[in-house]
Amino acid sequence: MIIALGSDHAGLPLKQVLLATLEAGGHTVLDSGTFGEASVDYPDFAHAVAAKVVAGEARFGVLVCGTGIGMALAANRHPELRAVVLHNSTEARLTRAHNDANIACFGSRMVGVEVALDALAAFLATPYEGGRHDRRLQKLSPEKVFLA
Ligand code: RB5
């Protein structure tokens, strides 16, 4: 699987672990940075990863910042994307199954490395269930909601 990866300075240490684990698992990782400890702006990296997923260059995106929240906010500005902040493998499994999430965001100041690795493994392994969830995903776009 091809996975786009990015972080800001706060997320860099966790990003490095995720990168090594993904590559050890046989995935191809497109790393958009950041590559150093200097303070940077998380939206720059969120949009770089988002662009790769939107273009079909990567199947999923993985983003890491201090909370995961800023990354998710930025990635979700792309209408094609569903970015989620993950704190455990249950969230990861259910958001793939029900929300067809395609960007996993982690807060390096919020979750431990093992928890993040378990969540990422569940995220990548879980298929979208489709069915009734298709209609709900359509309705994520406000213009697709018609109230009686
Ligand atoms: C950086 O200090 C921090 O604001 C950033 O990593 C992230 O948590 C923003 O949402």
Image: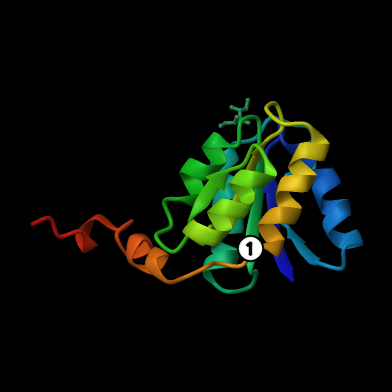
Query: Between residues 132 and 60, which one lies in front from this camera angle?
Result: 132
Determine whether the residue tagged by mark 1 lies in a helix, strand or loop.
Answer: strand
Q: Residue at x 41, y 64 (%)?
A: 133
**Residue drawn at x 63%, y 63% as measured from the top left:** 60
The quarter of the picture where residue 140 lies is bottom left
Residue at image point 64% right, 45% down: 90
Query: At label 1, which amino acid type do we have?
Result: Phe
In percent of width and height, residue 29 lies at: 78, 62
Residue 77 lies left or right of residue 128; in this view the side is left
**Which of the 4 image quadrants contains residue 86?**
top right
The reply to whether residue 48 is in sight is: no
Q: Is residue 61 above or below residue 107?
A: below
Residue picked out by circle 1: 60
x, y percentage for residue 10? 71, 31
Q: Quadrant of the N terminus?
A: bottom right
State how the image is colored.
Answer: rainbow
Which residue is nearer to you in this view: 87 or 54?
Answer: 87
| Image location of residue 57, percent across then percent down | 63, 73
Q: Quadrant of residue 124?
A: bottom right
